[in-house]
Every structure is written in C-alpha cells, then in structure tokens.
Amino acid sequence: MTRLVLKFGGTSMGDLDRIRRAARIVAAEYNAGRRVAVVVSAMAGKTNELVAWTDGAGRPAQGIDPTDDEYDAVVASGEQVTAGLLALTLRNMGLRARSWMGWQIPIITDDQHGKARIIDIPGEALGLAVDGGEIAVVPGFQGVTAGGRITTLGRGGSDTSAVAVAAALNCPCDIYTDVDGVYTTDPRIESRARRLERISYEEMLEMASLGAKVLQTRSVELAMAKKVPLRVLSSFIEPDDQGVLPDKGGTLICDEEEIVEKRIVSGVTMSRDEARITLLGLDDRTDAPADVFTRLAEAGVNVDMIVQSQSRTEGAVNLTFTTGRRDATRAAELMRAAQTDIGFQEIRLDEDVAKVSVVGVGMRSHAGVAQTMFRALADKGIKFQAISTSEIKISVLIDAAYAELAVRALHSAYGLEAV
Amino acid sequence: MTRLVLKFGGTSMGDLDRIRRAARIVAAEYNAGRRVAVVVSAMAGKTNELVAWTDGAGRPAQGIDPTDDEYDAVVASGEQVTAGLLALTLRNMGLRARSWMGWQIPIITDDQHGKARIIDIPGEALGLAVDGGEIAVVPGFQGVTAGGRITTLGRGGSDTSAVAVAAALNCPCDIYTDVDGVYTTDPRIESRARRLERISYEEMLEMASLGAKVLQTRSVELAMAKKVPLRVLSSFIEPDDQGVLPDKGGTLICDEEEIVEKRIVSGVTMSRDEARITLLGLDDRTDAPADVFTRLAEAGVNVDMIVQSQSRTEGAVNLTFTTGRRDATRAAELMRAAQTDIGFQEIRLDEDVAKVSVVGVGMRSHAGVAQTMFRALADKGIKFQAISTSEIKISVLIDAAYAELAVRALHSAYGLEAV
C-alpha cells in the first residue's frame, strides 16, 4: 500500500457540493489501493470573514501582550469546520475517516503567531491510522506551539501544511487547485501556453516568486528540502461511473534529475507588482548606495533590481531600484525624509512598470539565453530599464504597456508552444 | 481577591458591539477587584448554521462508526471564535486576557459525542492564571475526551460549562441572559409577575423542567450538587461612566437554607408541550398498564402523568397518560400497532392540553397548598384532567384554552404579586 496526501483549497471546500466532489476524488484514490491523508483549507471567503472580526475586535492596548495568539484561535476555526465536514462526507460514502486537528497530530510550530513555521510533525500515530485504512483529514493552515496554543501559518499556509504532512508520512502530495497545472506562461496572455508535465523545484520557486500564483513559495521550498514529489492538478476532474479517476494530468514538481527531457527555458512570467524609484543626482560617495539600502532594509522594504548610472551633474550618479508596489510609496517617503542626509537632487517614482522573466534550469549549461531574450525584445521595439539574473532566470523591467507583448514574444522566441 | 465566573449567551455574543458590551461588564467586575473567568456561547445563529452543514454532509453509511465525533469537531468551532474575539476585545481595553479551549484546560468529558457529560475539570492551571490577574475566556458547550477528541455537551450546554468552571474554581457563577431574573411566572402572561430575589436549587429545577426556559436543567443540577451560587441577570446592564456596575439585581439560585424569607409557593409555570393519550376499554388485566408503559419506555417515550378510571365496558378500564408533544404521534402509532396485543377498544390523542404547575419548597411544611389550587381553579370553572405531584410542586393538566387564565388565577391565589 502506498501513501498519498491530497490537498484541497478553499474553492474546493466552498460548499457541501464541492466537498462531496472532493470526497469522490479522495474515495477514488483510496479505492485504487492508496492510503490517504487529506489536507483542507477553510471554505472560500470564511477566513476573510474571521480575519475581519478580529480586526473589528481591535488591536490590543499599549502594554498588553500584542501577540496574535487570539487571532490564531479565531482564524484557525475555519479549517476545523471543513475538516469535520469532509470526514463526515467520507463516512457517508462508506469509508472510515476522521479529522486530526493541528493540536491532535500535533503539528508543532514556533510561536510566531499569525505566521508560524512548522518545527516538527511526529507522524507515527497519523501514519498508523492511515496505514490501518482510515482516511485522515487534516485542517491546513494551523498548528500548535510546544506550549499548547493554536497557531496559523499565514495566508496560503495550507499548501505548506500539506507538504509538511506528506514529509511526515514520507509520501507524495497532490495539490488540487482551480488550474490544471503549471503552464509555460499565463494562458490568459498567450493562448499557445502549454501545460508542463514536469518542472523542477528550483524552477517552480522562481516561477512562484515571480508571479505564477499556483503555489505558495514556502510549500515549494519545503517540498524541495524534504524531497516531497508535488503534483498540481485540477479539482474539476471527476471519477468515472466505476469511481476510477481518469489520467490525473497536472504538473509534477520534482528533482531536476527526474526530468528526462531537458528544456533550456521552462516558462515566462510577468509581474505588475513592481515600482521603480530613481534618485537623480546622488552624491558620488562610495557609501551613498549603502546608506540608501540600509535605510530601506531597516524599514522592511525589499529591493529587487538595482541600476547605477552616470548623472549629467558632475560628481553625482543616478540610482534606480525596484520594490514591490505595496512598499513603493513608503520607500519614496523614506527617501524624501532623508534627502539631505543621503544627498540627492530629485526623486522619481514610476509604477507603470512590469517585470518579465524567463526561467529554466537549462540556463546553467546553455549560453545564448540572454542573447535570445534581448533580440526578441528588440525586434518588438521594447526597451528595458533594468535587469536582474539568477543562475536559472533572467528578469527585465519594462514599460507596463508592453508587458503582454513581451511575454508573447519571449514565449515564441524560446519555442515554448511546442514543449 | 474573590473569584467569579461570568457566562454570556449567544445573543450577548451576537456581533462585535454586543461582545464589547459584555467586555465592559467583565472589565467592571475585574476592576472591582474580582478575579474573573468568562464562559461564552457561539454567536447567535452560528451553531444552527454549523449543525445544518453537518446535516447536509449526511449520516454515516451502514457499518461506519456512527458516533458524532465529527459533528462535535465542526459545531464546537462556534464558541472557539467568540472566545478568541472576547479575549481580543478585553486586551483592546487594556486588560490581560486569553482564551482556554476545552482541550487546553482541559474540560474532560465522557465520549457521548453530541451530548457529552463533564467528568472532571482540573482547575489548577486555570485558577493560577485567573488569580494572577489574567481574565480566562472559556468557550462553553465544548470539552474533550480522555482520548483527546473534541466533544460538545448538547444544546444549551454553555450554562453547564459555566457552572462546571465555577465549581472547578470554587466560586459563584453569574449567568447573563436576555431576561433580568427568574419570575414568579411568565410576565407575558401575568403583568403582575415579580422577580424573585432568591430561589432554591430544587425550586429552580422544577421551574426549569416545567417550562421556565431561563436555565438549562443540567446546569442547575450541577450547581446544586457542587453548591455553586448561581445568579441569573440581564446582559443589558451597563457600567456607569466610572466603569462601575449598578446593583446587579437578577435572581440568586442557592441553597434553601440561605433564603431567609420563606414562601410557600415561589412560582407558577405553564407548558403547552404536552399531549394526552387515552386508551378506552383497556382489558382489566393487572399487567396491562405495565405492558403499555414498557412498550413506551423501550421506544424512548417519556410519560409524565397517568390516570386510570373505570370504563363503561364491563371488565375494562380507561388509561390516560401524557407525553411531550414531540413524542405524541409516535406514541399513538406505537399503541395502535400493538392494539391487539395490549387489548383495548379505542385510542384518543388530544394535543389541546396544557400543564399548569405551582412550585415551592414551603409545600413540604405547609398543608392546604393543593386545596388553594383546586379552589382557585374551580372558582374560574376550570376542570383538570390529570394531576401529578412531587414534594415541592403540584401540576394539573387542563384544556389549553384555559392555560393563561389558570396561571393568573393561581398567581393571585398564592399572593405572588406581593412577593
């Protein structure tokens, strides 16, 4: 008997009909001979409702323990409900099932309430129950501190819960979502986008952090660290009349070595969540950039791309950097407030920018990837304002108006429609 | 420092405004020097929603563990939410507070899921926290088995939770409700009804089981067994501008010995949840009534009053009994199905009946209580169809049309408007 973890998100738990649909998928896996644990999110919208209530209850007064332990106690209840309902639904179908709350397994986390990290999942009891033929239903997103307080893992944490449970049970993890896999690019932008049968953990991490919203980044990191094979697939598949699942399709996220057909580039991503800030006429002291980025780091502003260029002013440079759009106004205000101390003449904030990236482990061994990218953009008359690279990706910052055009041009330049 | 348990029901937890109102009452008690634990119900309507979902998920299939453990896991989440929200609200007011789930204290129950009974509450940790100045917020209605599964105590169980926590903390319990105490009778029927300052546990038990819906019967039984002074009072009282509560009023439920001014009768209650079944021409065998009541008991039908009278038929009697209205149709069908075996000629079911009762510990030592009752009813031309008595109550079954008239007549006959 092989074990398998299945994970269903909030849309798949949205009402009793959707829960029954998920239960049929679980039953099909069980009846195909697998021993199954299921990780579930709260009903779609429910977590937002609970969070709004905790907001309405107000922030603790000065001097009162300001940790988010009670936020967690409230918000974790959403997954408790769906876990119980799915267990009931499975029993109704004649299967043995039970819910395992975070504190019952236990899923032990640190005490960073609201954004806790999983420390350990003692998987023995859970594994025994699962191997004995009982379907374990585990609420995602929640855990418990060593001191016995309820924690949550932060938004999207149910993916991480699922991977952690799979690691504890030493088995693969199927993530059911509202898309049927990971694509070479966003099909809403490029209709010729193709579903990838396999993608490496590293590539998926770059894709996830660059704007492909299929999986939470932490869940992919954890899967890579624990070597959990992760499959992303559609929750809309239906078992046939005999209760047998069709070919599941989806995308397998796995070690690079397990991917036989190597591609140079696996995908093209695009993010509009970018803003560009330029400090014009910055004093050409060697410590001026350090001064700028220290101030930003201390304020918790993440900086992505950095470009320094000559200024028209003698003894000065221009410094351009990008941040997430959410942080942009704050970062600009921070700079303005320190204008005299840092020493620059003018600041510009531009939110009409987009970041387009190509990702692929093949870049490690193939030259010419960047050259293809720049030629494809130049052929369409697209100028880039900044560049950043890693071992397996190249990103360019461009005028937002050209974002979709750039994605299609790159998709075609790397031949991704034929993957 | 004296300890105090406060309990707020679903209406008092109905929204954030109501939760803030409850928090102001808690703060007033705390600031008056008490050390406080609070027991809360789920938001009004929430438990019904959760129960409806578990109903929708369906009953377990044949052969699958049919216990209600998953029902409990789902339904207990409602109180988890309000406990967290009240703790947050108290912190927002500058007080130290935290929630204590049933499994955290723990409130240990048996494993009769859906209607569990509390076995033990180890109160040491809770008592230490409370004495240390932290307000403990405890979700009502829920507990945990020795094996670590979530249980619920059945509808209305939060009153019982509150009394059990008070017993564990060895302190009194204030139950905040939408009425301001226990009345000599229902003020909607008799406008001259008076609030009782004190009532004994025994009287309250009779009143509760006879239709005065102020408190759940089990909570009163537990308070009596554990000698927990119980106060019923209005959740609409408001601390003044200095945060001081006005005279709390309400009704104290306590030992008979602590009630100085003895009354013969404390209250008049009325219940329409009654049905009368008459078997006409029942064989005058000595074992015929036993046959009837054994069949009813085996079907789980509770019988209240019983009257046997002569039949016009030679060698036969008429047997009349009452049941709760919910069970009446089923009881009648049960009798019809066994008509030949039991041996009777005809069955009549009458749901147009009401039970009117007078309750008072003074009956133990005073004669003439029944005489006053029968004269008062006779004066109004009200006939009674059956009677039942206990040491401290007399109940009569009458035509439902006369129920309110009977209540007013008895209220006046015992002089209750002057209590």
Image (cartoon, coloured by chain):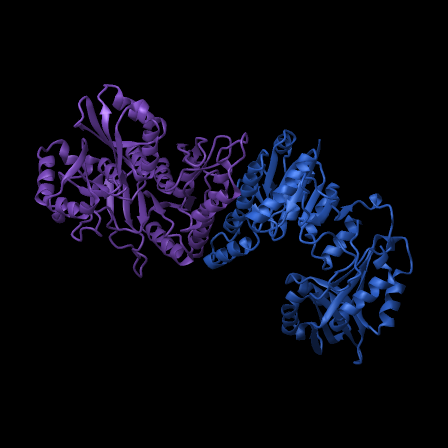
Chain colours: A purple, B blue
Question: Is B176 or B279 nearer to us in this picture?
Answer: B176
Q: Position of residue B211 (x, y in %)?
A: 72, 59
Residue that appears at 71% across and 65% down: B293
- B108 up-or-down from B309: above or below: above
Residue at the right extreme? B367
Q: Residue at x 54, y 44 (%)?
A: B80
Residue A184 seen from this side:
no
Vertical arrangement, residue A177 with respect to residue B300, above or below: above
Residue A326 locus on image (x, y percent): 33, 39
In this rendering, the count of numbered labels is: 0
- Residues A273 and B329: in front is A273
The residue lying at 55 percent from left, 53 percent from top is B47
The extreme top residue here reads A286
Q: Is residue A60 left or right of residue A356?
A: right
Image vertical order of residue B293 relative to residue B222, above or below: below
Q: Is B57 on the left-hand or right-hand side of B173?
A: left
Indicate the quadrant containing the N terminus of chain A: top left, top right, bottom left or bottom right: top left
**Residue B400 placement: quadrant:** bottom right
Q: Quadrant of residue A292?
A: top left
Q: Is B402 left or right of B122, judged from the image as shown?
A: right
Residue A87 image position (x, y, % from top left): 44, 50
Tell me where residue A255 appears, x and y as whole percent. Answer: 22, 36
Query: Does the rendering let one see residue B135?
Result: yes
